[in-house]
Amino acid sequence: MKKILFTICFMTGLFATAQAQMSVTPRASLAMPQGLLDNVAGNGFGYGLDLDYAINDNLRVGASAGQYRFNAEVFGFTINAIDFAITPITASIKYVLPGVSLRPYIGLEGGMYNFRVGAAGFNTSRQYFGLAPSLGVLYPINERMDFFANAQYHIMYLNETIPIADFNINQDIKFIPVNIGFSFKF
């Protein structure tokens, strides 16, 4: 009985000091293709939503969903008839470094990425696993809102070749979005 009572008191003390907090972060992105995607697409744009749960002042876990779109580009000319859309749905973990006014953090996301290629008369969509390490900052505006900015390096692991007209995509898809937004705390 003493062990159970001690465990309950210990856990209550642990959770009481953690001051858990939820936050919702809508974001907008400029996405820069890398590797093979850089050969066939120009810079894109994106948007998304992050949900975080602060376990303590430094550790956050959460989920993220977003979409990034790129137009095909050959020799600097945009081809509007072909576009690429990447939709990651991921779980995330962030370690926020101690600070008062500017709080840098490192993070990692992982999960399912939907990759869609659309062209005149051709549309394919497939799901792959991907990871995204990130570096970012949180700047408190007030008690309930932070300015948010980060850069991520998304790697979507292809396990097959995707034929598109006379071109084959057979390498991992990589891109770097630079995200900004506001984090609202509850």
Image (cartoon, rainbow, N blue to C red):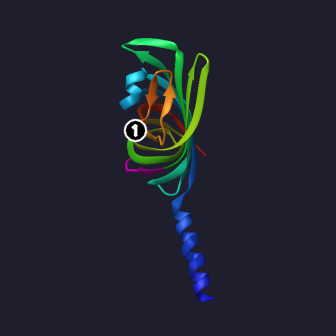
The picture places residue 35, in percent across and down from the top left corner, at 36, 31
Residue 31 visible here: yes
* Residue to which mark 1 is pinned: 153
From the viewer's side, name the closer residue of 178 and 165. 165
Would residue 12 appear left or right of 159 to someone viewing this image? Answer: right
Label 1 Cα crowd, 10 Å radius (few <14 / some 14-19 / many 20+): many
Residue at 37% across, 44% down: 104
Residue at 56% across, 56% down: 20
Q: Residue furthest bottom?
A: 1
Q: Looking at numbered disc 1 in the image, what kind of residue is underneath it?
A: Tyr
14 versus 96 height, above or below = below
Magenta residue check for 130 = no
Residue at 46% across, 32% down: 179
- For numbered disc 1, what is the local secondary structure? loop
The picture places residue 102, in percent across and down from the top left corner, at 38, 41
Report the magenta residues as a range: 93-101
28 versus 6 height, above or below = above
The picture places residue 52, in percent across and down from the top left corner, at 55, 47
The number of numbered discs placed on residues in the rendered structure image is: 1
From the viewer's side, name the closer residue of 98 and 73. 73
Residue 49 visible here: no
185 versus 48 height, above or below = below
Quarter location, residue 173: top left
The picture places residue 136, in percent across and down from the top left corner, at 40, 40
Residue at 52% across, 63% down: 17
Would residue 24 appear left or right of 139 to someone viewing this image? Answer: right
51 versus 55 height, above or below = above
